[in-house]
Image: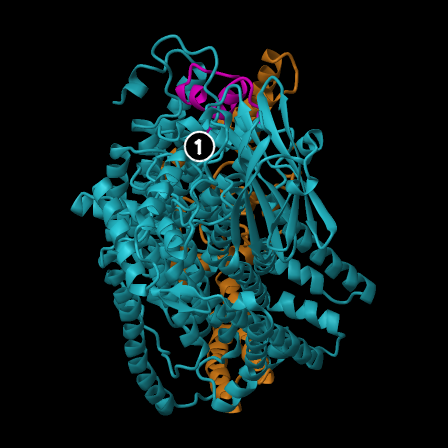
Amino acid sequence: MSPDIASNVASSPVAVVGTVALLLAYALAAWCVAAGVAGNARKSRRLVLSAVWGLYGFFALIGLASALIIYAFVTHDYSIKYIASVSDTTMSLSYKITAFWGGLDGSLLFWVLMLSVFSTIAVATNHRRHRDMIGYVVGTVMVVQVFFLSLLVFTKNPFATFLTQPPVDGQGLNPLLQNYWMVIHPPSLYIGYVSATIPFAFGVAALASGRLDDLWLSSVRSWMLVCFFFLSLGLILGGRWAYEELGWGGYWAWDPVENAGLLPWFTAVAFLHSVVVQEQRGMLKAWNLLLVIITFFLTIFGTFMTRAGIVQSVHAFGEDNVLAVQFVLFLGVILIGSLGLLVYRSNKLSSANTFESFISREFAFLMNNWILLACAFFVGFVTMFPTFTEAFVNERAAVKPEFFNHWMTPLGLTLLFLAGAAPLLAWRRTTRERLYSQFLFPTAVAVVTVVGLAVLWAPSRVTTAVFVETVSLPMPLVNFGLVAFVLASIGQEFWRGVAVRRRQTGSDPFTSLIGLVLNKRRKYGGYVIHLGIAVMFLGFGGKAWDTMVDKVIPLPEASLKEQGKPLKDAWFTVRDYEFHYEDLDQVADDHKVAVTAKLSLWRNGEKLADMRPARWDFRKGEQPTTEIDIHSRLDEDVYLCLTGFDLESRQAVLRIYINPLINWVWLGFVLLALGTFICLIPQRVVDSVSAAPKTRTGRVADVAILVGALLAMTLLSVNVARADTPDEGPVRVAQAGLEHADEGGLGKLGHDDGVGYAHLYRPNSPTAERLMKELICMCGGCKRETLFACKCPVAAEKRARVLEMLAGMDLSTAAGREKASTSVIDAFVKEYGGEDVLGTPRSKVSWLVPSLAVIGGLGLLFGVVRTWVKRGRTQVASAAPAVEDDELAERLDDELRNTD
Amino acid sequence: MTSSETPIEPAPTGGNGTSATEPVSAVEPAAAPAPTAAPRAQIPLGLAVTGGVLIVGWLFIAFIHGFHLTVATVVLSIGWLAVVSAAYFVLRTATAAADDAVAVDDWWRPTGARDELEREKKSLLKAMKEIDFDHEMGKMSDADAQELLRVYRSRALAVLKAIDALDSGGPRSVQDEIDRELRARMALSGPAKKTKAKRAPKRGAGADAASEPAASEKENAR
């Protein structure tokens, strides 16, 4: 028994009761596994019912443990180690409660709590419909709970107490986590992860019981939508937090832990699409089961990555080999168990229908699934690549964000195309005439957009690397063309849909639109989600021509006035913006010393905003924090970061980012949220709104209330995602990468007074810039940013070295530049004893494996589907019409007439 | 208050021989009343005891916090609710496991079979409307739309047939026969006999076994 349980429980009644609750829950979970599985296998009603009641009891016990943890936080019970490690008396109540999931132990308990809530709801609403498999559902969920509880009970007990005198005060929550985002971001991701367990449980139960009709799908579709929404929300919030708080001007850097949330998102999206094919055509049954298994597997894999320390990330909890082994074993059990069942039942998963044409909605959905799986494979492989290289060749490779972008850009654009094309295709096959009539308008809009932008807007002609550095294409143009295609395609769907509905019902356009959306919620809600994705891609496209500039401004206007110097020296220009450096202020209080640069932003002689980037040094904290200031516009953001200053001379060092189109990413999410809510509207609500007879006023009121509720939920999501970090927050977020290490050499520049290093030794040639974007800063404090982006003194020193090495080389010819690049890279590899200093692995495996997977996968897809298509055409030709009963046919026609 | 004066509502059941250890779902449609598993008086008593324990605990929590409503009080009250709930559910887990009633085959069939068929019928009708809609939007040719509609129609007709079979009392289990007989006799007799019938003993192993002789009596009578 772990010392945590045996020795340390005496001092706190809360700890005693909490530990007992966990132990009881563990025992009950084990009983539920045994009773549930045996109950369904042996058709024992009592065992099945016992398992169901046990699940509810488990929920109550975990609720008790959670309540006790929160009670301990609120009452400052520092005899409990976990409370002492993540809380202190100065924290506000909201942060004390959110500290529940702030550390590893508490986050595991939070996971168990969320899963117990969801499983209770799922079982309570489904156990009568699925009596012949509910025992398996309970058993599967409880296997997961047993695993997590074994971690809690045996190694990570959140109720473990101190052996000796407990501390008077706690250590407090990491300042990085004490902000608005911490309340929302982790729970939303956890909810997304945990909700994928329910479809998995039903899928396994369907396989175990042999009930492989579509019934289990209807129980899990909404859960997967919930999973999709919360993963999306968690990812967007993470991006927004990174943009607002971390000061590197971006929102997504393919951090391993961020990628861990993206992997199940890909497969959840794939499932939501392919389930439509199963419902409509009875196809892809095995595929859907595989997707729920893979999605669940990836949620556990993501948790494993975050908690076991196998990846390097600012998000990771830290290295824990024992935990890593436990997770690996559990992942093995999941895979072997569920895939084994899938193979066992494979003969029951065939479909009477098959593909009849490549130009069909079924094939478009299948293609969509393959691309999504390819994305998941690529991101997963490259994320784990450093771990693989460390394990197999004893050298941890690094992968810079650009490597991901080279691949994910073309894959993402393919998905974007399918988002617009699939709705235009028909089930089974689309004839040439139909293809022409459906694709004409969206294609024309896309072509006009591309041509117009290419001629009129220079930034759209920027080329970016695709797949490899040497292949460069105008991807922004392709992106914008496809965005226009999707917008036109979805717009056409709405337009024609409303027209058809008007013809069918005789109602006005607005009523027809509402009726269309409410009665075909999944379809048109999905279209709204597609619109959201297209808008997000519009935002992604702006990255291709963003600007980053480091500026040193010796004196503010206030000082220039004092010294009688020309005031124009306080002005500087970046692109078409003018910045006026007014003053540098220092303010001190009990908590911190704040140095703020006062600037104003101008354009074409018009003042746009006052900007106040700052640096705060907390008296309690170890690391200074950076306060970004952003002026947001619909077309671009102006983003200011104070990277250094000199209080004596009042010199300011600023890093300025101009981020085109970035706000469309957040706006796109709003549409995505709205679309998801539309899909989730229950049938009962639709029935109540569309019940007749009603007056016109009553109908309008019903619709207005429903639309209002949808908008309110969407705006709530928006509000959650907004970056309104309160000014009166006690602690601000530390900026990763800001002067986190001083290895000497540049110490003479005054590290302690915050002069800053970001502006030093900037590249003076494209070759230098390319090299600085390829080499990783090895200081160990940042999240492996490149020398180009990192603001620390180590990065500055290495930039100086790059410039020094290039100074004596011939950069006038392509061959000379290539030779220079190679020699600099070789020198750095030699200095650091490995290739982990490189942002792009030189190993061919890093790109060969994904290439083979993607190309091979597509080849396999086409080959297999070609066989199916041939078979499908034969089947259709040989199918004979059935004879109908007249009375039944008449009834069916009546019911069809009354169906909306 | 006597049993003859006080009509007591039957416990919610699935109409397929479920016992009172069955968890109750709010989604479950109303089914034919069946004899309950526990004596009527125990259910209000159980609820009363649970409620009493809950209230006493909350009062104690409030007392030790000086009757001040704080976050700690609220959290601890939620904890006490969790304790009482856990005790209740663990008890039900144990009693369910110890319940030696043999489930008839019907219990394993999902309840609300007719509801499932209705659901499937609505789904097929919607799919047919969808095809019709896509056809009107110009995505599908006439031939393809008719072909797909034909497939869905034949499935929908099969579902209608299955619904009719259920409604007209098609193939039924022995348990369903007993339920129908009981309902018919209750409808014929007065309220007193109805009340008496509602307080029939728990449907356990004996009931299932008893259904066999009842069925065979019926068979003999024919």
Q: Which chain is cyan?
A: A
Q: Report the side of A290 relative to A757 (left or right).
A: left
Mark 1 crowdedness (10 Å alpha carbons): few <14, some 14-19, many ≥20: many
Query: Magenta includes B211?
Result: no
Q: As displayed, is residue B178 above or below residue A615?
A: below
Q: Is residue B102 visible?
A: no
Q: Is residue A667 visible?
A: yes
Q: Which chain is orange?
A: B
Tell me what residue is drawn at x 50 percent, y 22 percent: A73
Q: Chain of mark 1?
A: A
Query: Magenta includes A72?
Result: yes
Tell me what residue is drawn at x 46 percent, y 39 percent: A758
Q: As displayed, is residue B109 above or below residue A56?
A: below
Q: Amino acid at mark 1?
A: Glu
| Quadrant holding the C terminus of chain A | bottom right
Q: Which residue is mark 1?
A: A739
Residue A109, percent across and down?
42, 33
